[in-house]
Image (spheres, helix red, strand yellow):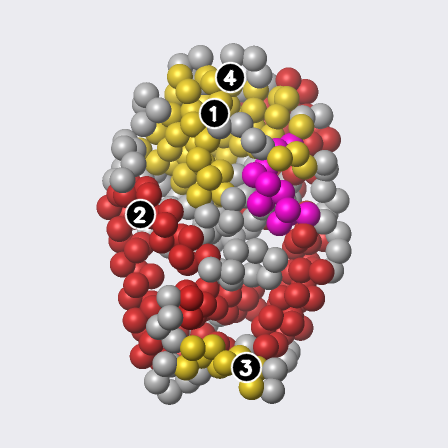
């Protein structure tokens, strides 16, 4: 069965981009099979579904790869559409698993089998006046995902600054904002960037504030985007959607998007000071699922905290509830 047709692409002689199906609107997460002089490396694995597992089986067969020949798996970041299949894939390949130290910490916190992150998210959202039953649904949502990914294999810190392919060096870059220690890979002579979820075409990557992570992710993301505007990149391959041929332009568009949202929030703060109300106003035109509410609130918090940290608004606590004031 030619499942790969249209869904895998040879980026260089040593790098294959593979769309693995995910049960989300973006449909696929793009993972990579990467060959260096000595080994075969997987970059990202996908979300744990029967479809995704079957896809990988067929990919290995079609590309004549014996899974036990894969010696390393590198996860770009901890989000479950990238990392969720890790237990299955690690067992299938016997490979060592690597992440940046920030993402290794986060995957263990969120998907390591404890209820800590779900409870911390509940408490954080409660302080921002998120009402029941949404609060409980958010907590259940985090626990549901945690149970899907758990148990985790041993996760090692990835400390390399480059990967050597027979056709040149891939520099390892770490960009924060979407995730605190998101790994990207840059082919220096061909000027190709594997950009993961850092920049996407058409949709803007989610920039959210979560417990136990970067507490000013939007500031980190602005730094990342400004850095990317200055990089010499011929083409960037994102983890969702089509390749980005003008990355600097796309990065600039996303900077504008967040600046517009900050301006919008400043207007909303004239009448509403609680993060949940601000979220409702920002997303009033959309019908959100509980899962989407979780991201909408966390994204609004990222913007509000950015405004606080840049001293444009104040944050005060009244009877355990936070308010943001102009
Ligand atoms: Zn992500």
Distance between the alpha carbons at the discs numbered 4 and 1: 11 Å
Magenta region: which residues? 97-108
Mark nearer the viewer, 4 or 1: 1
Magenta stretch, overall SS: helix
Distance between the alpha carbons at the discs numbered 2 and 1: 22 Å
Mark 3 vs 4, N-terminal side: 4
Q: Which mark is residue 317?
A: 3
Contact? badges 2 and 3 (CB < 8 Å): no
In the image, farthest residue toward the front: 311
Query: Which residue is pictured at 66% across the width and 53% down the height?
Result: 110
What is the crowding at mark 1: few (fewer than 14 residues within 10 Å), some, or many (at least 20)?
some
| Residue ID for mark 2 | 226
Q: Residue 7: x and y, percent?
A: 44, 33
Mark 1 vs 3, N-terminal side: 1
Distance between the alpha carbons at the discs numbered 3 and 4: 53 Å
In the picture, the quarter occupied by the C terminus is: bottom left
Q: Which mark is residue 36?
A: 4
């Amino acid at each position: 069965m030619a499942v790969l047709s249209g869904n895998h692409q040879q980026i260089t002689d040593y790098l294959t981009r593979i769309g693995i199906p995910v049960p989300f609107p973006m449909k696929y997460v793009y993972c990579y099979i990467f060959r260096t002089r000595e080994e075969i490396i997987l970059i990202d694995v996908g979300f744990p579904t029967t479809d995704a597992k079957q896809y990988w089986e067929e990919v290995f067969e079609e590309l004549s790869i014996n899974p036990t020949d894969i010696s390393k798996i590198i996860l770009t970041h901890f989000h479950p559409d990238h990392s969720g299949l890790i237990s299955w894939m690690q067992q299938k390949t016997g490979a060592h698993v690597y992440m940046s130290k920030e993402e290794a910490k986060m995957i263990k916190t969120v998907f390591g089998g404890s209820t800590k992150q779900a409870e911390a998210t509940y408490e954080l959202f409660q302080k921002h006046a998120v009402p029941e039953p949404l609060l409980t649904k958010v907590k259940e949502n985090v626990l549901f995902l945690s149970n899907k990914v758990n148990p985790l294999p041993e996760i090692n810190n990835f400390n390399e600054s480059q990967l050597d392919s027979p056709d040149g060096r891939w520099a390892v870059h770490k960009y924060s904002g979407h995730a605190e220690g998101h790994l990207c890979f840059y082919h220096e002579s061909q000027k190709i960037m594997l950009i993961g979820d850092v920049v996407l075409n058409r949709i803007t990557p989610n920039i959210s504030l979560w417990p136990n992570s970067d507490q000013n992710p939007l500031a980190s993301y602005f730094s990342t985007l400004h850095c990317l505007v200055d990089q010499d990149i011929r083409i960037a391959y994102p983890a969702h959607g089509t390749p980005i041929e003008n990355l600097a332009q796309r990065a600039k568009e996303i900077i504008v998007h967040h600046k517009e949202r900050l301006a919008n929030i400043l207007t909303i703060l004239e009448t509403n000071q609680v993060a949940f109300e601000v979220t409702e106003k920002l997303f009033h035109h959309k019908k959100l699922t509980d899962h989407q509410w979780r991201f909408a609130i966390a994204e609004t918090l990222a913007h509000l905290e950015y405004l606080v940290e840049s001293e444009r608004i104040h944050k005060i606590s009244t009877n355990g509830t936070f308010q943001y004031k102009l």
